[in-house]
Image (cartoon, rainbow, N blue to C red):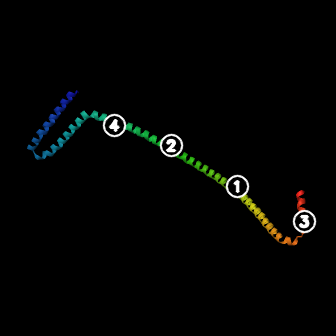
Amino acid sequence: MKLTERAGVLCVTTLFAGFLMVALPAAAQAADVQWRPTYDVAMRWINFIILVAVIVKYAREPIKDFLKLQKSDIVSELGELESEKARIISEIKEVKTKGAENRLHFQELKDRLISQGETRKQQVVEQGRQQSAIMLVEARRKMENRITQAKAGLKMELLDMAIDQATVKLPSVMTAGDTQQLLDDYMSSLHA
């Protein structure tokens, strides 16, 4: 059927239905009152059938096209979501792998730092031992130097005390011959 023929059939159907709606209620009112509920139910069914016929006749193709479009949109959206899901799963796997690698690298770094710390500790201990040995040698040298200086100072004091006592006692003990003998010994030591 062509579009004009369809429109003509629709107009005739609509006019007939309109006539029934106008004519039948008047006849229904003149007749028995109990017929009204049956009339209302029949008219509801007629209206429903007309609505379904109009929807099937004119809206079927647009609804099919709309549903096909929605279907293709949903399928493409599902495909995008699946690819996004696969991408996210692969990223999660990468993150887990990198996390395991980082933990391994961290453990290696920790072990290396601990071994370097132990080595450095041993070096520091050895340096401390060497410095303490050097300090002990230096302290001994200083002590020996002080002892030597103290001995020399003590000898000088003893010498001074001996000279002081000798100057006090010798003039009374020494004679002129002893003095001459000391001078001769001194002069002979100078010539030799």
Q: What amino acid is found at the position of numbered circle 3 in the picture?
A: Gln
- Mark 1 or 3, nearer chain start: 1
Percent x, y for residue 17?
15, 36
Q: Nearer the viewer, residue 110 or 3?
A: 110
- Mark 4 or 1, nearer chain start: 4
Percent x, y for residue 31?
9, 44
Residue hosting label 4: 70
User: Going by the image, does 110 lie left or right of 146?
Assistant: left
Quadrant of res 26: top left
The residue that appears at 38% across and 38% down in the rendered structure is 77
Q: What amino acid is found at the position of numbered circle 1 in the picture?
A: Gln
Quadrant of res 179: bottom right
Residue hosting label 1: 130
Callout 4–callout 1 Cβ contact below 8 Å? no
User: Going by the image, does 76 lie left or right of 162?
Assistant: left
Residue hosting label 3: 180
Mark number for residue 185?
A: none
Residue hosting label 2: 94
- 17 lies above or below 125: above
